[in-house]
Amino acid sequence: MGKRGILLAIGVACSTAHAGALTVTNGLAQNTDGYLRIDPDDYGCFGWSIGPNGQDNFRPPGDTLKAVSYLAGAYLFIRTSDGKSSAVVLTDSTRWIGLVEPGNGNDGVVGDHTTLTRRVVTANAANSPSDIQSAFTVEESPTGPVKLDFTLRQVITRDATTNVSQMQQTYVITNNGTAATDLIFHAHDDPDLLWTTNDYFDDIVGVAPGLCAVYARQDPSMTAAVALRDGGSSVSPKYYYGGKAGVTPEMGPPAYMTTVQDTPIWLMRGLPPTWQNHIAALGYNMVGESGTLAGTMADAVMGIEYRFALAAGQSVTIKVDRVYGSSAPNCTPFAGVNCGNMMADSGEDCDTGAIDSASCNANCTAVVCGDGHVNAAAGEECETTVDTATCNATTCTTPRCGDGHLNTAAGEVCDEGGDTATCNASNCQPPACGDGYVNAMAGEQCEDDTGFCDLPTCQYNFKVGGGCGGCGAGGSAGLVPLLILLGLRRRRR
């Protein structure tokens, strides 16, 4: 069953049932070449749904009017200076939220900031038929450190000579919280270009000349297309990707998925490292496209990603252009597209020839525990942002008692790197007489019940003239030291 059939079953998309959905158009009549209509919500999400207007509609020159995107919108991934991280779907569609994060109450906000909420402050309002604006906030209530305020303006413009239109979504993000934050803003588009009998299965994904925009087009047309590019943000986009379902990138899994294309992005809290600057069936940092070769006759998906830090009181402007009608729009190259040339170019932290080193990841980012990339050359054994039963946060190593990292998720009560008066190095538990482990730092001399050890105190506590004061549990155990002493005296005689 194709994705349209799946949609009828799971209903994943934005729809006009959303309180803030409002129509914007490029002003052309519906039967005109180049006509574009979009119904975005207050957060900038839109796409196909069973409703009559809950979709973007585009008519390329010489073709018929069709719906274009299955789902278009954005994710926000938040990491505060205390190491806590959370994820937010920027939409009011519980259908999309429930798809990427099933089992979490469809609240769209998950992670360490347990009281984080997403709330519309000002619903979509029209400045003109092609220009709307809204405001929303992502904040930790009632007094948490996270408070990110957004204004959003969504404007459609058109080039009359080319029939190319664009929807520019301008997000101004202001950190009005008390904590510095590292943010990942991921603009996502799952386009379904339906101008052939193969529907979206023969859509081609690619990256434009100059490595500056990622696009999907309907084979063989170059104008039955939608592209993502930066529209002049105050920070440069860091990564792009264009995937085809079932294709595994050359640097390894995860593969692009068959139905829930964006779930790996959500679970990894950003693009998986193997997807960064990758086009399916083409490779990394290369101008070109996937084509419709064997193995790529599958659903297409694409996105661009911004990574930046916001100090308290600081603002940033993200401008995402969604271009309709061109596979090669004019644009500014993405940061980091020259990763692998052994030179730290603009947007790169380092460059070791696309090979992991002790200080540099193969994707030209500095090694940071929690960045989603396991770098064995840097001593990493796993990747996590919080302690788990199998991985230490901050060190990205497997939990080992005595490693000096207290990991309560792995059952440790203490971990001081060795025996101390309050911690056993063998099991990372507090010392207890009778636990079977002799901890000299805790004053223990013995840990057995042979009669030589005073179990209540774990001391060798012999009395002159017989016995061990308080030894054992009674019976004959306390007579053993006396019998040994008597044997020694007889030998001397």
Image (cartoon, rainbow, N blue to C red):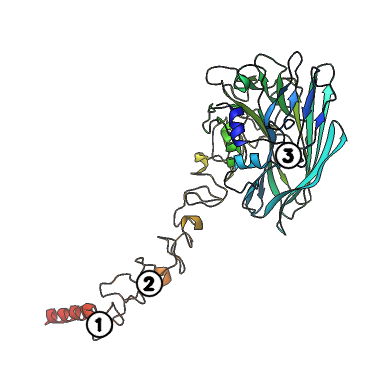
Q: Nearer the viewer, mark 1 or mark 2?
A: 2
Front residue of 161/432: it is 161
Q: Residue furthest bottom?
A: 465
Q: Nearer the viewer, mark 3 or mark 2?
A: 3
| Left or right: 322 in relation to 270 | right
Q: How many angstroms separate mark 1 from mark 2 (CA)? A: 20 Å
Q: Position of residue 439 (x, y in %)?
A: 39, 67
Tell which circle, 1 or 2, labels the residue nearer the N-terminal end.
Answer: 2
| Left or right: 491 in relation to 414 | left
Front residue of 70/281: it is 70
Front residue of 421/229: it is 229
Residue at image point 33% right, 69% down: 447
Q: Using the rendered image of the protein, determine whether residue 185 is visible from the camera's viewpoint.
A: no
Q: Which mark is residue 17?
A: 3
Judging by the rendered image, the residue that carries numbered circle 1 is 467
Q: Please state, as top left, top right, bottom left or bottom right, where the N terminus lies in the image.
A: top right
| Left or right: 342 in relation to 430 | right
Q: Nearer the viewer, mark 1 or mark 3?
A: 3
Label 2: state its secondary structure: loop
| Left or right: 165 in relation to 145 | right
Residue at image point 35% right, 74% down: 458
Label 1: state its secondary structure: loop
Front residue of 254/250: it is 254
Judging by the rendered image, the residue that carries numbered circle 2 is 433
Contact, mark 1 vs mark 2 (Cβ under 8 Å): no
Looking at numbered disc 3 in the image, what kind of residue is underneath it?
A: Ala
Looking at numbered disc 2 in the image, what kind of residue is underneath it?
A: Cys
Q: How many angstroms separate mark 1 from mark 3 (CA)? A: 85 Å
Contact, mark 3 vs mark 2 (Cβ under 8 Å): no
Q: Position of residue 249 (x, y in %)?
A: 54, 28
Q: Position of residue 377 (x, y in %)?
A: 50, 39
